[in-house]
Image: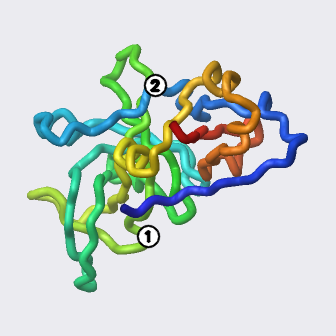
Amino acid sequence: MRADGAFIPFTESFDISRVTTTVRGVGEMGEVIYVDLQAPINSLIAKHVVKVGRSSGLTRGIIMAYAVEYNDEKGNCFFTDFLIVGENKLIFELEGDSGSLILLIGDEGAMEKPRPIGIIWGGTANRGRLKLRNGHGPENWTSGVDLGRLLNLLQLDLITTDEDLRGLPSFLSSLIFYSPEMMCSSTKPSAWIIHKF
């Protein structure tokens, strides 16, 4: 499994009350989605996602594939959990967005909170374009890691609410995982809080 992120140690004087789990430009998030490989293919493919990245900001995309092995233009073989294509032929991520949280969004008008489903680890800037659909030329795409599977393998949990964040014992507040988009935030930083079960 391949994943990307940053862990930042804090001094004792760090004020955790200045941190929020709200995603800038998206709002509050729901619980992590754990992909069910026995579920029908349409429960995941063609679903809409968003992410906020350090380089590209807020972008929207569509999940095109899950558990994909492919060869790039140079013949290198890769495996990825997700392939995501940006909406309206726009790029979903840019170099520097690796580690950004991918959130599954509901249908237009749905009251459901966006739910974390993956983390970006690469895309077009690194490996070129792929022909993903019949009747379309090569497209820009993004690779993502299945967040639920990653958390299970590492025996970690993701804190998705400010209430849960405030309830952390003080020794756990030092295990804060910052996503790249917080690095350019001029407001309250966003953090994905991860701790061991």
Q: Nearer the viewer, residue 130 or 1?
A: 1
| Position of residue 193 measured from the top left corner of the image (x, y, whole percent) | 60, 38
| Position of residue 21 measured from the top left corner of the image (x, y, whole percent) | 62, 31
Callout 1 crowding tier (Cα within 10 Å): few <14, some 14–19, many ≥20? some
Q: Is residue 188 left or right of residue 36?
A: right
> Which label belongs to residue 30?
2
Spatial separation of the CA atoms under disc 1 and disc 2: 30 Å
> Which label belongs to residue 125?
1
Q: Nearer the viewer, residue 25 or 157?
A: 157
Between disc 1 and disc 2, the foreground one is 2
SS state under label 1: helix
Q: Where is the N terminus found, in terms of image quarters?
A: bottom left
Q: Earlier in the sequence, mark 1 or mark 2?
A: 2
Q: Name the residue type under label 2.
A: Gly
Q: Residue at x 23, y 49 (%)?
A: 64
Q: How many marks?
A: 2
| Position of residue 111 measured from the top left corner of the image (x, y, whole percent) | 40, 14
> Which label belongs to residue 69?
none
Q: Is residue 138 left or right of residue 18?
A: left
Q: Name the residue type under label 1.
A: Ala
> Vertical placement of 106 versus 192: above or below?
above
